Amino acid sequence: MSVLTVLVTGASRGLGLELCRQHAQRGHKVFACCRTPADAHALNQLHLDVLPLDVTSDESATALAAKLDETHVALDILYNNAGVALNRKANMEDVNTDLWAEFLNTNVLGPARVLKACIPALRRAENGKFKVVNISSSLGSIGRLADGVPVDLPATDVVYRSSKAALNMSTACTAVDLRKTDPNAVVVAVHPGWVDTDMGSRRGNNDGLPEVKPPLNVEESISGVIATVMAATTKESGTFLDFAGGADLVRVPW
């Protein structure tokens, strides 16, 4: 098995932490990025290369780019995992537009900043074979929304849903762009499932909706995510994949 070099954003907890753990267990070189490395106690116990990164900051992304360039890092996989979720009702008639803008800045512009920072390192991958993985959500699927969703689920959250739908479009556009310049690149959005993490759980929200424990643990989710990513080829570039399919590469409707 070849030793891959991966970079994970939002690595201090939840899905990002588990991505780092499972890739490290496979013997891969891992760059783990989070806002405040000194406070990332669980992450630091993995003894990886931990780098500071605020995905909402152009300056922070530029500093990451400089760090990767000065050490001539060649990245095989970039995981744009850092994100925010609301997990409560956010209907159009009472939506907080300032909050909406913050979500778009983190969930859409954040991955764009990170990709811009990392593209030189990705292009140093052997034979230009690199993968960009945007951790999305089926809640961003317009197709699934059109099929109908229960009103007591966080699917009523237009803020989060729209940010992931925008990330999905960004994924598709990036795949088209890189197909011209980097024909061996693979760019995919991946739905990790509804996972029992701090971000994924509906607990303590006073919005009239019931508390719900997500059905998946992080180990199950990330095992499927990694299997999906490892199996994805240029044929899948520009698609939206479901973690549950693993190496079978099951697509989620846009």
Image (tube, rainbow, N blue to C red):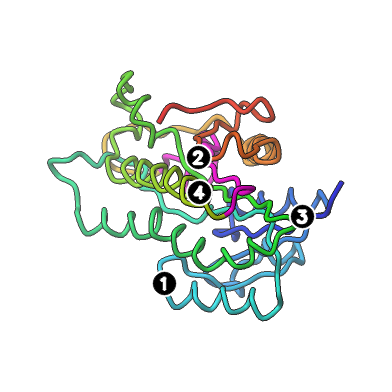
Q: Where does label 4 land, which residue?
A: 198
Q: Main secondary structure of the magenta part?
A: loop
Q: Where does label 3 land, which residue?
A: 4
Separation of disc 4 and disc 2 at Cα? 29 Å
Q: Are marks 4 and 1 in contact (CB under 8 Å)?
A: no
Residue 71 in the figure: left or right of residue 160: right
Helix or strand or loop: what does disc 3 sit on? loop
Separation of disc 2 and disc 1 at Cα? 26 Å
Q: Which amino acid, by three-letter code, is at mark 3? A: Leu
Q: Which range of residues does the magenta coloring cover?
A: 182-203
**Front tag of 4 and 1:** 1
Residue at 26% in and 53% down: 100
Helix or strand or loop: what does disc 2 sit on? loop
Q: Where does label 2 land, which residue?
A: 238
The verdict on residue 180 being magenta is no
Mark found first going from the N terminus, 2 or 1: 1
**Front tag of 2 and 1:** 2
Q: Are marks 4 and 2 in contact (CB under 8 Å)?
A: no
- Relative image position of residue 168 (x, y in whole percent): 42, 42
